[in-house]
Image: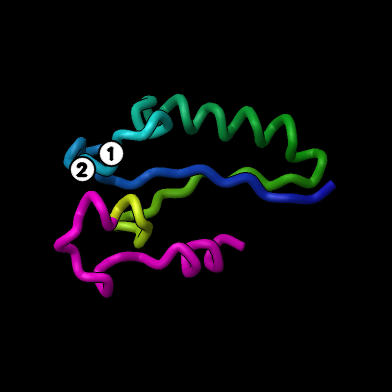
Amino acid sequence: MDGTITGGLSTSKWRHTSKLTSSFLNDRPERERRALAQSLAREFGPQGIHIAHIIVDGFINTERVRSMAPDRKEHTMLKPEAIAEMYW
């Protein structure tokens, strides 16, 4: 079996400066997410599944983010496709 599972957050969560970090996963402490990634890696790594805990530092250009930051210019946001390509 091969595969990849990724999870992540932005540095704004660490600083508590963004209303965009209010989802369930981002409300959990960073150490718990890191511990989950480490536990998943121990469990699934031997099966060929790579676990990655990533930090995306910037606004991601999604419908939800655009609705929460309507004045933000598109060229200042990260493209989801580019992020996916980076980690694929």
The residue pinned by badge 1 equals 13
Nearer the camera: disc 1 or disc 2: 2
Residue shown at 35% from the left, 58% from the top: 60
Element under disc 1:
helix
Q: Range of the magenta residues?
A: 66-88
Q: Position of residue 68 (x, y in %)?
A: 23, 49
For disc 1, the neighbor class at 10 Å (few under 14, some 14 to 19, many from 20) is some
Residue 48 lies left or right of residue 15; in this view the side is right
Q: Position of residue 41 (x, y in %)?
A: 66, 36
Residue shown at 34% from the left, 28% from the top: 27
Q: Which mark is residue 18?
A: 2
In the image, residue 24 above or below residue 19: above
Magenta span: predominant SS is helix
> What kind of residue is marked 1?
Lys
Residue shown at 42% from the left, 27% from the top: 31
> What kind of residue is marked 2?
Ser
Q: Nearer the viewer, residue 86 or 24?
A: 24
Is 81 magenta? The answer is yes
In the image, residue 12 above or below residue 32: below
Residue 47 lies left or right of residue 23; in this view the side is right
Residue shown at 30% from the left, 34% from the top: 22
Name the N-terminal-most of marks 1 and 2.
1
For disc 2, the neighbor class at 10 Å (few under 14, some 14 to 19, many from 20) is few
Give the Cα distance between marks 1 and 2: 7 Å
Q: How many marks?
A: 2
